[in-house]
């Protein structure tokens, strides 16, 4: 900024010398190096375990559609004149498309196919899209797991051994045809499989329809000579392809439709098998969990964004809390407790849940626990084991409750485990009105339906390896009920005559009470058969003995702060961001981001001539009302830019150079949405925003 006049004139690049560059890198590396901190190692170990599970699960989920596309590309006939095209519907979760299509490209390359990954931002014209396609084929770019080699240096002067420079003149389809024929002679492969040229359009809707139309028509001329296959990543519906391309272009494509799993399926699968499992030490609180799921469901449908949000929560949990050192696998728990020093033990004593636990004990035990280091460690081991058992019981019972109520009409507690988890993790779910409503509906469940649910519940308990005595007792009781319900019939329990409701005396004061009293009497006087009596006994056992007594919120267990993170204030602004506040800060005080001396302000209202033009125009527009006079705005702008010349010359004579800079700044403000043209006055613009960083 010191050696440039205006941001509207262009972008200036200053390459530092090698020594300065190395020094800056070293300094930057030192700032971001967390490896020596106490919290980083347990955080890194835990996240590696979680990340391994995530990759395995996501690969399993996407394997089916990827295998189908690979089989289609392998078996399709490219000599018919039409271009084989796989249209992959992936949904609106755009951030997740990159991972799926990169996995597809990797698999295709392993089968000796040549792959070109194209993105709309790099293909603004037919020339660009052809150059990008041919360059990737000629270079034989290896697709990386999380990176794409999308930008190529065709005429780079750098002599880098790892890069193969390609001239722009070689990036043409005739040259690609020559390259493929030569490459085909040198390839040693089975005659049953020949390598194909696969072109993947990552974001089909982002491409210009004119560019795609010409590109496909040009490719069709080479379809008999080159084994070209197209893969289109579509975010909406297949009709988008037909709307974008005219009939004469669509007729050149032999399209086949593929569809990936919906993003909600990915989310539920990820949560159920990783974060809502018994063996996951890190637990999310109710507020954080609801916030992350709301961002997913109502903002971007991105599982990748959801996982990054959880990763940030995990990092914040370890960074902000010294007690998080015990947020680890059970096998590492005892060793980590033994390695605690006195300062770390004091941090555990400061936890509110631990203090509540200590206050319930006698004063003698309180003094003993606080004074003795060894006793404190033994107490921690005991409490952490109990916490793990409670967390294990909690997750098992949440799954049992989801099996029981997940398919009920209107789903009072929700259909998915994540919905029940978010309600039960912080508060007692048995006090929820939806909980009581679920058991009222379950009172009308048919025998075969109730029996199926009971068998699923017992199966979940049988598959659990580590169970507490509470869970073992519940499992035994459920198996007994399973046998009883399976054997019970529909005969009457007894033949005792019931009194007529009309002979009962009513002590009611309103019609609502009268109706409620009648409903209770009709239910109590209605003769029950054997199944109904057994069903009522079973549901009462689940309601009163299993869920009410055993499904305890994690927040009520001592030391829950060690594994549970629920500080939404520390992560909300960082996950969803505050773009308006960031833009206001950048325009009002550019020194905050540029860190240059020429833009350093002594007070917030100061306007410097060395600031970028858009910042000057923005700060001047803040002083105006709802309508801004363009000439007055220009005069103020010129006064700030060059106050000496403006004072010497006539105010109405402003140089064309300053006018051009002002016009550019106004256009940028209009693009950002701060102003718009006004119909009230021709020489005025309307101001669209009010306030600062709100």
Image (cartoon, grey):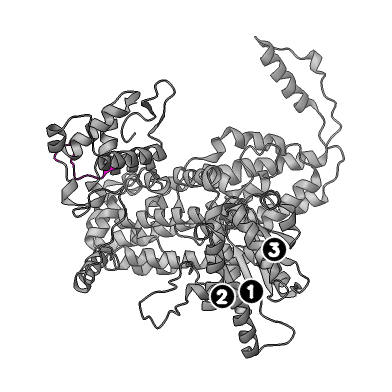
**Up/down of 34 relative to 366, above or below:** below
Residue located beneath label 1 in the image = 197
Report whether 635 appears left or right of 492. Answer: left
Residue located beneath label 3 in the image = 86
Residue 211 position by quadrant: bottom right
Label 1 element class: strand
Q: Pointers 1 and 2 in contact (CB under 8 A)? A: yes
Give whichever of discs 2 and 3 has the lower sequence position. Answer: 3
Report whether 74 appears left or right of 385. Answer: right
Q: Position of residue 160 (x, y in %)?
A: 38, 80
The rendered magenta stretch, by its main secondary structure, is classed as loop
Q: Is residue 312 magenta?
A: no
Mark 1 to mark 3: distance in Å? 13 Å
Range shown magenta: 602-614
Query: How many C-alpha atoms fall within 10 Å of the one at disc 2: few (<14), some, or many (≥20)?
Result: many
Residue located beneath label 2 in the image = 137
- The residue that appears at 44% across and 69% down in the rendered structure is 331
Label 3 element class: strand
């Amino acid at each position: 900024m010191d050696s440039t006049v205006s941001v509207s004139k262009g972008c200036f690049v200053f390459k530092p010398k090698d020594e300065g560059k190395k020094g800056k890198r070293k300094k930057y590396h030192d700032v971001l190096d967390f490896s020596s901190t106490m919290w980083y190692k347990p955080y890194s170990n835990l996240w590696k375990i979680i990340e391994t599970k995530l990759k395995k699960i996501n690969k399993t989920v996407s394997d089916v559609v990827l295998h189908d596309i690979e089989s289609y590309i392998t078996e399709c006939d490219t000599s018919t004149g039409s271009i084989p095209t796989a249209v992959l519907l992936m949904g609106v979760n755009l951030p997740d498309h990159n991972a799926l299509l990169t996995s597809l490209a990797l698999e295709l390359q392993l089968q000796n196919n040549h792959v070109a990954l194209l993105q709309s931002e790099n293909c603004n014209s037919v020339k660009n899209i052809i150059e990008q396609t041919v360059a990737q084929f000629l270079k034989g770019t290896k697709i990386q797991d999380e990176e794409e080699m999308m930008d190529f240096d065709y005429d780079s002067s750098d002599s880098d051994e790892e890069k193969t420079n390609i001239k722009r003149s070689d990036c043409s389809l005739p040259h690609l045809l020559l390259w493929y024929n030569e490459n085909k002679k040198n390839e040693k492969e089975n005659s049953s499989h020949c390598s194909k040229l696969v072109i993947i359009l990552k974001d089909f809707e982002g491409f210009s329809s004119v560019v795609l139309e010409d590109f496909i028509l040009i490719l069709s001329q080479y379809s008999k000579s080159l084994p070209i296959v197209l893969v289109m990543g579509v975010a909406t519906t297949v009709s988008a392809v037909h709307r974008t391309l005219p009939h004469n272009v669509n007729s050149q494509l032999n399209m086949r439709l593929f569809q990936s799993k919906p993003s909600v399926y990915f989310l539920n699968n990820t949560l159920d098998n990783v974060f809502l499992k018994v063996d996951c030490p890190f637990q999310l609180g109710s507020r954080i969990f609801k916030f992350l799921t709301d961002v997913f469901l109502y903002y971007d449908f991105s599982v990748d964004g959801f996982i990054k949000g959880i990763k940030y929560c995990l990092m914040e949990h370890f960074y902000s809390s010294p007690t998080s050192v015990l947020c680890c696998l059970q096998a590492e728990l005892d060793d980590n407790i033994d390695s605690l020093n006195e300062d770390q033990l004091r941090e555990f004593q400061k936890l509110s849940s631990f203090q509540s636990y200590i206050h319930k004990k006698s004063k003698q035990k309180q003094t003993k626990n606080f004074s003795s280091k060894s006793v404190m460690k033994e107490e921690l081991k005991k409490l952490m084991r109990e916490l793990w058992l409670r967390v294990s019981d909690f997750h098992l019972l949440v799954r049992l409750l989801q099996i029981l109520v997940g398919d009920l009409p209107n789903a009072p507690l929700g259909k998915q485990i994540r919905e029940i988890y978010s309600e039960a993790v912080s508060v007692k779910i048995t006090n929820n009105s939806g909980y009581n409503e679920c058991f009222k509906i379950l009172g009308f469940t048919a025998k075969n339906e109730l029996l199926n649910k009971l068998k699923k519940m017992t199966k979940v308990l049988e598959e659990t390896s580590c169970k507490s005595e509470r869970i073992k007792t519940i499992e035994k009781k459920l198996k007994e009920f399973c046998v009883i319900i399976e054997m019970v019939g529909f005969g009457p329990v007894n033949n005792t005559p019931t009194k007529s409701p009309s002979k009962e005396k009513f002590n009611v004061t309103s019609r609502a009470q009268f109706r409620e009293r009648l409903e209770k009497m009709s239910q109590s006087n209605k003769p029950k058969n054997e199944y109904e009596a057994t069903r009522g006994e079973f549901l009462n056992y689940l309601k009163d003995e299993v869920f009410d007594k055993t499904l305890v919120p994690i927040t009520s267990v001592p030391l829950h702060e060690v594994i549970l993170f629920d500080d939404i204030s520390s992560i909300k602004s960082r996950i969803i961001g505050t773009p308006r506040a960031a833009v206001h800060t950048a325009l009002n005080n550019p020194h905050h981001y540029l860190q240059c001396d020429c833009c350093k302000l002594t007070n917030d209202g100061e306007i410097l001539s060395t600031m970028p033009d858009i910042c000057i125009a923005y700060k001047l527009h803040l002083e105006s009302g709802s309508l801004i006079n363009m000439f007055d705005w220009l005069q103020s702008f010129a006064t700030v830019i060059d106050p000496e010349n403006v004072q010497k010359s006539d105010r109405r004579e402003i140089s064309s150079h300053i006018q051009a800079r002002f016009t550019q700044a106004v256009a940028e403000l209009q693009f950002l949405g701060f102003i718009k043209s006004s119909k009230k006055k021709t020489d005025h613009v309307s101001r669209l925003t009010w306030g600062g960083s709100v």
